[in-house]
Amino acid sequence: MNALPGPDRKPPLVGIVGHAGAYGRWLARFLERRMGLQVRGSDIADPGSPTPAELARQVDVLVFSVPIRRTVAVIESCIAHADGGEAGALWLDLTSIKQAPVAAMLGSRAEVAGLHPMAAPPKIGTLEGRTLAVCRARVARWGPWLDALLAAMRADCVEIAPAAHDRAMALVQGLVHASHLAQADVLRRCAAEAGGMPALHALRTVGHELDLTVTGRILAGNPAIYEDIQFGNPDVLPVLERLADATTALHDAVARGDEAARAMLRQRFLAEPAAWFGAEALAARSHGFERMGYLQADLDAARFLSVYLPEDRPGSLRALLAVFERLGVNLASIHSSRTPEGELHFRIGLDRLPVSLALLRAEVEDAGIGRVLEARDDA
């Protein structure tokens, strides 16, 4: 069963432990549609599916896509039941931490690599535009196939050791999530005193809006993921201790309020971090912030048309814009994005309309170019 694909061999059979989960479903679609592979799954949410250990004996490539808290136990169970039968196979995992699952997989006789997609399952068919951490722990004969898999995913792959990955994730994920979870708690407790969230929104800044966007994304997601990232990565606790120390120092300085406290704030929290980032990096970050502000303003515009172009071909957008030109409609902005269902669309901000919005919508749809998803004129 565990035969590496070659000119005279069949493509590998892939098993996904956790195939009913968000990433398990996405990966199954990707492997079947993009790579033409046969996929089998095991999941506690699918009572009719085989156990992970049974699946391990059936497949050539086994992928663990289960919650962090369960990953090591599931891997160890597969090893115990496989009893060496996994030799010649390739085992992968998609966990947000890497040291523990990779170490557990190395207890098997399979070839081993740890993967961490640095984004939620995308609406599109690949990981294009996303980062993928790759920990090649024990890869030999399966190296070419793994390379082909990564190339098909189209991700920005970063080769990294498991320990280095987890140290980085304590800052990239643990610190960021903790900061926003704390902000959410403070907002919940204090927003009413400032008139509630509608009042805060009316007085919003770009920074406030961006922070709320990140916070909302976290709170709208699977709570178990964010919980496990905090508790499952041992490198997170020291980072949180540093965060608590910094927050306490800032609190104490503001409570004192004297010139010495102000000087400390300027030095520790402004001057020293600015010097550490460097002028060039700070200028780039500042420009990026301005760009996000302009984007935010465009997306908040009261007059716009959102159009889905079903035919992804050269000239589709030009044909759409020709309708606006013919009607004398000037565009204020245009941005491509995706709907929650994954459909690519163009959100077109409009200047003052020389024709009715209803006519503009009808002309776009009658031209057979695309479908209007939303149209609004609240200006």
Image: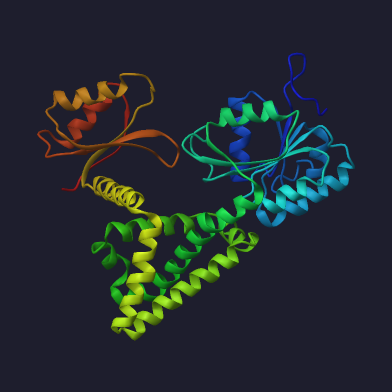
The percent position of residue 9, horizontal first and vertical second, equals: 77, 17
Q: Quadrant of residue 312?
A: top left
Task: Specify the farthest residue to the top.
Answer: 8
Task: Depth check: give the residue in front, 137 or 189.
Answer: 137
Query: Can the viewer see residue 243?
Result: yes
Task: Depth check: give the residue in front, 103 or 222.
Answer: 103
Task: Specify the farthest residue to the left.
Answer: 354
On screen, 338 above or below 197?
A: above
The percent position of residue 16, horizontal first and vertical second, equals: 70, 39
Task: Depth check: give the residue in front, 160 or 96.
Answer: 160
Residue at 45 percent of width and 54 percent of height:
217
On screen, 73 above or below 253?
A: above
Quadrant of the image containing the N terminus: top right
Residue at 57 percent of width and 28 percent of height:
151
Residue at 38 percent of width and 22 percent of height:
311
Residue 233 placement, left or right of 3: left
The percent position of residue 140, horizontal first and vertical second, equals: 75, 31
Residue 76 placement, left or right of 366: right
On screen, 235 above or below 118?
A: below
Task: Specify the farthest residue to the right.
Answer: 83
Query: How many numbered marks are there?
Result: 0
The colour mode here is rainbow
The percent position of residue 47, horizontal first and vertical second, equals: 74, 46
Query: Can the viewer see residue 44?
Result: no
